Structure formats: C-alpha cells, structure tokens
Amino acid sequence: MSGRELTRQQLDPAGTTGTRALTATLAVGAVGYALIMTAISWREISHPVIATIAVVMLAASCLLLILASSPYRAPFTRGMHYVIQAGVLAAIALEAAGQSTPNALVTNDWGPIDLGVLIIALGPYRPARELAAAGAVAAIFIGFLTLVRAEHLLTQAPPFALVVVAITPMLALCFGGCVFSFGLVHSIQKWQRRALLASQNLVEELREGIARSVQQDRVTILSRDVLPFFSEILARDVIVPADRDRAREIADSIRSVMVAEFDRSWLENLIELAGGVGPGKAGAAAVVVDDPDRVASVMATDQRTAIRALLVAMIDFPDFDRRDLRIQLSKDGSGCRGRVAANLDITDHVLHSALAPYFAVMRAVFTDFQIDFVQPTLTLRFSYE
C-alpha cells in the first residue's frame, strides 16, 4: 500500500476532476503539431515509414495519457508517467531516424516541443520535482540525439549551439509547468493548513456547547429511568428485594448507553443520523458498521469527506434500506482496509452516471480502490494509512 503524493490530484481530488479536458486538449494538440511539422518537412524525410511510426508512437502515448488522466482511474501513478515519457522519447528517436538525410534546422523537429507540452499536461497528476527530473533526463537524451545528427545539419553553427536550440523550448515548457504546478500544490497545502486551524478553533468554541448538550442528554436519561424509580420507592416508603434487581438493570442500561455513545465513531454517527429506511437512530450503527479495531478515526479529513459524501449519495436513493448496507473496517499491518457493500436496485448505467464523481474522489484519496458491481450488490474495497 503506497502513501499519498504531493500532487494536485491527490491533494484536491474534487478540484482536479475538471482538468482532464485541458489535458486531452494538450495531448490532441501535440499530435496535431507533429502531423503539421511532419507534413511541412516531408521533403527532408528519407524514411517515411519510420517517420510515420514516430507519429503513431506519439499518438499512442497521448492516448494513454488521456485515458490514465481520467478521474475514474485515479490516482495517476509514477509508473504510468514513465511509460508515457518512454513512449514519447521513443517517438523522438524514431523521428530523428526518419530524417537521416541532411536537413536545414533542428527547429523543424516536433519532438522537444511536444514533450514539453505533455509535461505541462502531466502537471496536475505528478509531483513537480518528478516532472522536472524527467524533463532534465529528456534534455540529455535530446541533446545526445542532436549531437549525433549535427554533421547532417546544413548549418555552420557549433554543435553546442544546436543542442541549446533543440532543448531550450522543451526545458522552458517543462520548468515553467513545474513551477506553476509547485505553486498550486503549495497554495493547496497552505489553504488546508488554514482550514484545519480554523476547524480546530471552531471545535474549541463549540466545546462548551457540546458539553452542555451531552450533560442534557445524561439528565434526560436520568429523568426518564431513574427519577420514576426513586419516586416509586419514596411513595412506598420501603425497599423490597425486587427494587435491588431493578436498580441493577437501570444502572447497567445507563452504563451501556453511555459507553456506546462514548465509543461511537464519526462514521457510526453518520449512519445513525442519515436518512433512508431501515434501522432507526437506536440501532443503525450496530447493524451497518463493523469496526472492531476503531480505525474509522484514523481517516484523514478528505477521506472522511469522500466516504461521507458517497454514503449520503447512496442513502438518498429511493427506497434505500440501511439494512442492506455493510461497512467493514480493520487493521492490515501498518495500514487499514475498508469494505463497503450495498444493495442498490439500479442498473449499471445509472450506477456510473449517479456515483461516478464520488468514485473518482474515492480513487484519489484512498489507495487500492476497487469497484465490483454484480446487480444489485455494489462492493467497494479500499486501503488507507
């Protein structure tokens, strides 16, 4: 189970779901630019088949980027980034091989520009340092190809100058995108710290009111069970053996209620207070939530928000019965595992259209997130630290 990374997709999953349109636009634009530059420099191409394969390789890498950037396949992994970059570098090498005859300028090559554009497209999904390192490695690779081809270029410029011309546009796009992405990640982290501090201050402000509310709940329990019992004894003015047994039952009942309320997690409170039919406030949590290790409390704030939103969305389905919902949480080594199973009387199409945004956020904030829907049972499995 891998930890979360400092990417916009994982720090702000809901806010990043809309960036896929820009990613797809940049990817399609990269392929279009390669086609235009290939057509313009067609007379300088000595191996049309290799040049065509280069464009196809680029198109395949861009298609893979579009598919992997889907919020429904989050998170975007490091391995996927490396596969895409390897495909683009292979396309750049094939492009160079297709232009083995003397050509005029390295500026006719579409590879470096397209690579820089794709690194910008990867900005929301991978850490800025990783993208900068990948850009530096790519610059070394492109510089090496330029030096190998230097004797075939129809220019008197020194090889070093040709290398600078070849890699500068790519590095400018790469590092510009990395700085922008790093700034956004820093802003998100700063906002989250401020929000957490505000939340803590609010808890302190509400603590006194919560304490009074809890005290009132205790007084209500005593008024309902204890005071009538004492009033009955005072009216009789005598204690009989049966009173001892009843007093013991009342004490055990009050103790069990207080312990249950004290141990109840935020997830159990959510189930108790949520709508839908099925068990009421007195028994919903016991029926639905199975958390023997009490690991619901270790979820991060965004994880709690994601699962709360998903559960509320499911409970809002017509005729949803909470008795058909099961939540299991348990320890798994140094981490935790969760399983949510629900019976939903809906079709697969309705499931994905109604719950797909919630699944996207769940994928971003939890690791090893899996979906299994065998009508009518929806099963979700996930991990967290």
Image: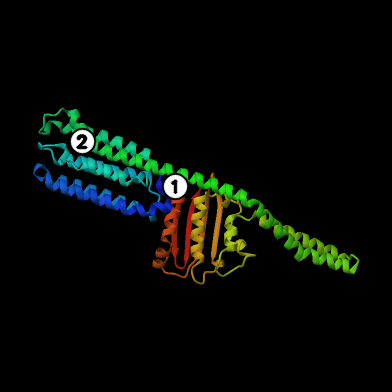
Which image quadrant for residue 136? top left
- Crowding at mark 2 (Cα within 10 Å: few <14, some 14-19, many 20+): many
Residue for badge 2: 166
Mark 1: which amino acid?
Leu
Query: 287 or 134, which lies in front?
Result: 134
Does the image show residue 301? yes
Q: Residue 311 carries which label?
A: none
Query: 93 or 111, which lies in front?
Result: 111
- Per the model, the C-alpha gap separating discs 2 and 1 is 35 Å
Query: 41 or 234, which lies in front?
Result: 234
Furthest residue toward bottom = 319
**Residue 28 placement, left or right of 354:** left
| Residue 199, percent from left and from top | 55, 49
Question: Which element type, helix, strand or loop, lies under badge 2?
Answer: helix
**Residue 215 placement, left or right of 13:** right
Q: Residue 11 carries which label?
A: 1
Query: 123 or 243, which lies in front?
Result: 123
What's the residue at 23%, 50% (across, down)? 29
Does the image show residue 367? no
| Colour mode of the rendering | rainbow
